[in-house]
Image (cartoon, grey):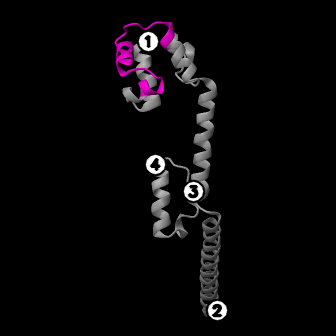
Amino acid sequence: MNRRLQDIIKYKTGGRQTAFAALLNWSPQYLSKLLKGVDFGLQPVVSIIEALPEINARWFLTGQGEMLSDEKQADLRREALEHVFQVMELERFIPVMTPDELRMFERQVREGEKADFSPDTLQSWRERLNLREREINTKFATAAAKSDELCRQKTAKR
């Protein structure tokens, strides 16, 4: 069970035992005893399960199943998908972002933060993207017309 307790500490506080002890109002010495398997009775188990409802009690007690409850896993999946969809939505604006906006977006993506841009910024990107698309379409139409003209000239010479 002390191995599973170590897993919970890694999950909740990144492995910082003092922070985990403080989270549960335990002394670091008490947590150290538990990690060594000393005095691991029912009370610490109850304290952990009450303080961290996302922990699967069956897993903690027996090692069977997953560390996180099904509900918590579903929440994490939903949050991850929302983050992915948000990043995918903003990804289309990359070609029209300023260097500062790109740096901010990159930092948010790398750090797993929610990309947070104002409605005015999003509107500005939409306008820049629409302008860019119109410019590309105009260039494409011009190139296609020129190509058609060259084909007609070659056909007329034969």
Q: Is mark 4 on a helix, strand or loop?
A: loop
Q: What amino acid is at disc 1?
A: Met
Direction from residue 24 to residue 79 in the image, left or right: right
Residue in the picture at 57% in, 56% down: 116
The tag earlier along the polypeptide, 4 or 3, is 4
Residue in the picture at 49% in, 52% down: 109
Asked if the residue under mark 3 is in contact with the one under mark 4, i.e. CB atoms within 8 Å, the reply is no
Of circles 2 and 4, which is in front?
4
The tag earlier along the polypeptide, 3 or 2, is 3
Asked if residue 136 can be seen in this view, the reply is yes
Residue 116 is tagged as: 3
The tag earlier along the polypeptide, 1 or 2, is 1
Q: How many labels does the image show?
A: 4
Answer above or below: position of 89 versus 68.
Answer: below
Q: Main secondary structure of the magenta part?
A: helix
Residues packed near mark 2 inside 10 Å, few (<14), some (14 to 19) or many (20 plus): few
Answer above or below: position of 62 versus 78.
Answer: above
**Between marks 4 and 3, how big is the CA–CA gap?**
13 Å
Q: What amino acid is at disc 4?
A: Glu
Q: Is mark 1 on a helix, strand or loop?
A: loop
The quadrant in which the N terminus is found is: top left
In which quarter of the view is residue 121 placed?
Answer: bottom right
Q: Is mark 3 on a helix, strand or loop?
A: loop
Q: Which residue lies furthest to the bottom in this view?
A: 157
